[in-house]
Amino acid sequence: MSQNSSKLDTVISNIFLSGIALIPILSGLLLLWWGESQSTRYGSLGEEAARTVVEMKDVSKIDPALDGKLVHAVGQAECETELKDPVLGVSVKGFCLERSVEYYQLTERQEKRKDSSGRLKESYKYKEEWTAVPVPFDDFYDLSRRKKAKAPIVTLPFFHEKAKKVRVGAYALSDFLISSVEANRTLKPNLTAEQKRALPNKLKTAENLVHVTEDGVYIGSDPTVPHLGDARITFKFAAPSEVSIVAQVQGNTLEMYHRDKDPDNVFIGLIVKGNVPAQQMLKDLKRNVAGGGWLARLAGMLLVVPGCFFLPWKSLMQRRYVRTVINGPGSRSTEWQHFGVVRFAFALLLFTSGLTRLFNGSFIIGVTVLALAAAMLFLPCIMPNNKQETFAD
């Protein structure tokens, strides 16, 4: 009965450890699969685009011969309508308009430190600073700090509006291309005297607390000396300028470029400011895609490698084929066995990477990576016997 109970405890323990291990392992492998898929697909599409892109020599008139083709166009962007903040009335012509609000708040930070006797002690630090959101202070540890803290005089949500119609010569830009241009220029409020007089009513605050400055709108007693509860509103926009575009011509519109019959909806639609050659734009895209791929690989590694150490190796190593794969023929030192777990984790990562590339049409690289994974996993099997320590869990 005691032996059966011990076996049951071992099985339950192994199931528990496997469950803990599988969560980060599967998450890391799925993340790696997604990252490799995106990297391979976009890399392939980028190479195809570099071969097929056509220079649009004249953007001022529609060229039917270019319909359906991937083109590189350079021209002056023209935004047809003004963008306007619905609350403050600030307006501008551009790709987009953003309103951001910051609040001068008292913030609390908790710190935990061990004292000389090893006991954990908590302390709280308070600071007056600008924050992106109002800070709730009802739960501050220090009661006197709760009384000192103040709610913002005014609260406003973040606001973003993009242009509905933007043209480059005779061609309209798709919503995706318009949205791809980020707000990067500070906008000084262009308010009339009447709009300025209406601000206190719109913001529901006293007239002497509203100040229109070079940077935006300040709500508080003195824009040069912030006090708790003050708020400042700033605006950014993307101005019309000369732009370079890599996109597909669809009638009189520049759209995202889709590969024919692509089930994964992979696309290219590039727009940058200035006169930039097509090959340079596509090279930058390739570099960004490669960077994203390496981030996915790193994230996968940080999940899979620690996850593998939670597997129930003590029970697994009782099986000869598992022990041989991890240690080689014969027991080795604990350090060697830990190295075997790391090697097993990297073999999993390489196997997933190679399989993903095979599924996405990258045959040579896929087979190479799979061969490397197999070599990494089974190399210890042909190593000489070395009997030392048994596996320590």
Image: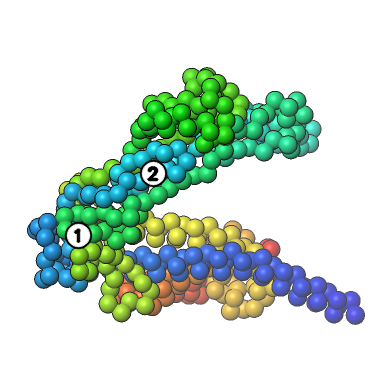
First in residue order: circle 2 vs circle 1 = 2
Instruction: State the separation of the CA atoms marked 2 and 1.
Output: 24 Å
Q: Is residue 392 visible?
A: yes
Instruction: Say if 121 sits above or below 299 in the image.
Output: above
Instruction: Say if 41 sits above or below 133 in the image.
Output: below
State the image quarter where residue 356 is shown. bottom left
**Where in the figure is residue 249, as x and y percent of width and height?**
20, 67
Amino acid type, residue under disc 1 in the picture: Tyr
| Residue located at (17% from left, 63% from top) | 71
Q: Nearer the viewer, residue 365 or 73?
A: 73
State the image quarter where residue 241 is shown. top left
The residue identified by callout 2 is: 84
Foreground: disc 2 or disc 1: 2
Asked if the residue at tag 1 contacts the one at tag 2, i.e. Cβ–Cβ closer than 8 Å, the answer is no
Q: Nearer the viewer, residue 23 or 254?
A: 254
Quadrant in the picture for the C terminus? bottom right
- Left or right of 206, for residue 13: right
Q: Nearer the viewer, residue 211 or 287?
A: 211
| Residue located at (33% from left, 38% from top) | 185
For residue 295, the mark is none
The residue identified by callout 1 is: 171
**Where in the figure is residue 345, as x and y percent of width and height?**
53, 66
Amino acid type, residue under disc 2 in the picture: Lys
